[in-house]
């Protein structure tokens, strides 16, 4: 009788398994992805990529890079053509290509972006008129909770700049090695090309904080850090003041990530800020850096 029950259970399990063949949609139209954030005092850098169907094998930045595009930025009637360039991503051991060039961006100036690619033209503009904010304190927090669950990281306090709608995003610059893994991938991505040497990384927060309904008040913001750490690790913490378009774009990216992780949240589409393409052209003003030293190893 027990043997018969086991056989029936096995048949039930097998009957629930079914192979499904998925045929990729052949009519998908390739889109252009554009991401460019201007920082005062830095040379403009624009990332261009091809948004491809899900099952295409091209996935690395080099493979999806939009080669042969004409990228120009105009300021005060002077147009500058950006050139293709790249930097080595030591964390993922690969090259990250982009378009870069021209004079450094300046506070208070407007910049117009034009991208010509495969017979299509894309345009966007940004004005760097956000106020620079001052960080009052950076404290370590071993655990806090948000919609994604529990995290460790830092808590930042700043005095909101009154009289304007402000959007803030966390930035941490630090050095890591291949023993300090990414918090979301852990052992899945490990730098195997650095041979234990330290290399620089920039950690950008996924959450955009707004001063809506708290204009001019003291703001306290818990932030999850993206990389593991050890006691004594030295970092520099900034807060970015984003323009409205950049804030809206990155807020939608965060909401989409939440909808992917949480099956009870309705699907969210990224709110592109560039007509005809997916992406954003905006600006960010950095606060002065604040030195932060981790008081313990990550939990």
Image (cartoon, rainbow, N blue to C red):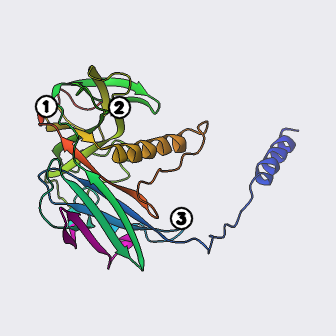
Q: Residue at x 58, y 37 (%)?
A: 265
Dominant secondary structure, magenta: strand
Circle 3 crowding by C-alpha within 10 Å: few under 14, some 14–19, many from 20? few
Q: Position of residue 15 (x, y in %)?
A: 80, 53
CA separation in Å, label 2 and label 1: 27 Å
Does 123 appear in magenta? no
Residue bounds of the magenta highlight: 62-86
Q: Is residue 228 above or below residue 136?
A: below
Q: How many marks?
A: 3
Identify which residue, 295 or 50, lies in the foreground: 50
> Which residue is the site of mark 3?
54
> Which residue is the site of mark 2?
210
* Mark with earlier residue (2, 3): 3
User: Secondary structure beneath disc 1?
Assistant: strand
Q: Are marks 2 and 3 in contact (CB under 8 Å)?
A: no
Q: Which is in the foreground here, disc 2 or disc 3?
A: 2
Q: Residue at x 19, y 51 (%)?
A: 39
Circle 1 crowding by C-alpha within 10 Å: few under 14, some 14–19, many from 20? some
* Mark with earlier residue (1, 3): 3
Q: Position of residue 195 (x, y in %)?
A: 17, 58
Residue 282 relative to residue 260: left or right: left
Give the quadrant of the C terminus. top left
Visible residue check, residue 142:
yes
User: Secondary structure beneath disc 2?
Assistant: strand
Query: Mark on residue 293?
Result: 1
Circle 2 crowding by C-alpha within 10 Å: few under 14, some 14–19, many from 20? some
Q: Is residue 88 above or below residue 265?
A: below
Q: Residue at x 61, y 74 (%)?
A: 27
């Amino acid at each position: 009788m027990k043997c018969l029950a086991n056989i029936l259970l096995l048949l039930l399990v097998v009957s629930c398994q079914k192979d499904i063949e998925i045929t990729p949609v052949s009519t998908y139209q390739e889109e252009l992805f554009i991401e460019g954030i201007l920082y005062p005092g830095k040379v403009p850098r624009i990332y261009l990529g091809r948004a491809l169907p899900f099952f295409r094998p091209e996935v690395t930045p080099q493979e999806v890079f939009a080669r042969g595009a004409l990228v120009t930025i105009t300021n005060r009637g002077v147009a500058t053509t950006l050139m293709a360039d790249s930097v080595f991503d030591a964390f993922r051991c690969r090259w990250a290509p982009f378009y870069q060039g021209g004079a450094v961006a300046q506070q208070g100036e407007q910049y117009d972006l034009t991208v010509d690619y495969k017979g299509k033209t894309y345009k966007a503009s940004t004005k760097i008129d956000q106020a620079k904010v001052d960080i009052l304190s950076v404290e370590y927090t071993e655990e806090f909770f948000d919609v994604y669950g529990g995290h460790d990281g830092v808590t930042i306090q700043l005095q909101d700049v009154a009289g304007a709608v402000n959007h803030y995003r966390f930035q941490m610059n630090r050095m890591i090695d291949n023993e300090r893994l990414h918090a979301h991938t852990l052992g899945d991505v490990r730098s195997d090309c650095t041979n234990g040497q330290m290399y620089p990384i920039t950690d950008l927060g996924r959450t955009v904080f707004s001063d809506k309904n708290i204009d001019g008040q003291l703001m306290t913001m818990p932030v999850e850090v993206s990389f593991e750490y050890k006691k004594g690790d030295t970092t520099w913490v900034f807060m970015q003041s984003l323009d409205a378009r950049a804030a809206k774009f990155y807020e939608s990216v965060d909401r989409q990530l939440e909808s992917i992780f949480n099956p009870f949240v309705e699907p969210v589409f990224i709110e592109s800020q560039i007509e005809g393409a997916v992406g954003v052209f905006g600006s960010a003003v950095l606060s002065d850096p604040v030195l932060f030293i981790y008081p313990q190893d990550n939990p």
